[in-house]
Amino acid sequence: MKVGTDGVLLGAWTPINRHPISILDIGAGTGLLSLIMAQRSFAEVIDAIEIDDDAYEQCVDNFEQSLWGDRLFCYHASLEEFTEEIEDTYDLIICNPPFYSENYKTENDQRDLARFQDAMPFNHLLESVSTLLAPNGTFSVVIPYIEENRFIEMAASLKLFPNNILHVQGNPNSPIKRSLIIFSFVETSIEKDLLIIETDRHKYTSNYIKLTKDFYLKM
């Protein structure tokens, strides 16, 4: 299965300066984020959740073939099931949620919003995170830029507050497409930054290369 830029960016950018001991990857897909966090951190426990049968099998296979298989475990369950059953909390929760692609937007804003919400209801995600996150933990997520304000408002209702935001542009002339956000239960001033991926087709910026080079074979 293909590796998406969103996942690589989120895994590479997510701060680990708090030295998380336990990490949870929600909607792991084939395990990309979990594997990046295993490579970057000394976390003793890296759990992943994946509900899709094929993705789950691929995720387990990727974990077993990696250098960090003893620290990685994937649960074949829905987020709702997992949240109800697990009593532990996590120092870091990371998520690249499935969302409806802007490439197929229609002229009907209300319909587009509904389809975004159907992909992975943000309120469902945030409610689970607020339960599973340790009191001093952090939650790292990538979402469409157009959803940023609404997502932050929903998080605030659960006492989750943005601490860091990275806006991502494909190139200097394109609109901002993605927001990478770090949340915690601590309300602080927000550190904001901007990352541009390319200056031209396949000509990556130095900032993008610096951030992601450890996770590509050719960069």
Image: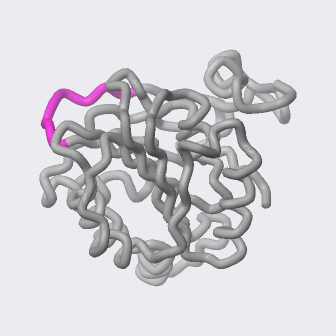
26 shown above or below 7? below
For the point 65% across and 35% down, the residue is 173
Q: In this view, does 191 lie above or below 4?
A: above
Q: How many numbered marks have been drawn onto this rendered protein structure?
A: 0
Quadrant of the image occupied by residue 52: bottom right
Which quadrant is home to the N terminus?
Answer: bottom right
Say if 39 sits above or below 63 in the image: above
Where in the figure is residue 119, as x and y percent of width and height?
Answer: 50, 75
Determine the residue positioned at 71% across, 31% down. Answer: 215
Can I make out residue 145 in this image? Answer: no
52 to the left or right of 66: left
User: Residue at the spot x=59%, y=72% of the render?
Assistant: 105
Name the chief secondary structure element in magenta.
Answer: loop
Q: Quadrant of the C terminus?
A: top right
Is 175 within the magenta? no
Q: Nearer the viewer, residue 42 or 121?
A: 42
| Residue 29 as seen in the image, left or right of residue 91 | right
Above or below for 34 versus 106 = above
Q: Which of 82 and 125 is in front in this view?
A: 82
Q: What span is in magenta?
A: 185-192
Image position of 113 (left or right of 213): left
Q: Which of 122 and 145 lies nearest the eye of the viewer?
A: 122
Spot occupied by residue 65 in the image (x, y as percentages of width and height): 76, 48
Q: Which of 182 and 137 is in front in this view?
A: 137
Viewed as shown, does residue 145 lie left or right of 148? Answer: right
Does 191 lie within the magenta span? yes
* Colour setup of the view: one colour
Q: Can residue 31 be seen in this view?
A: yes
Residue at the image point whose x is 58% and y is 44% from the top: 70
Q: Position of residue 17 (x, y in %)?
A: 37, 21
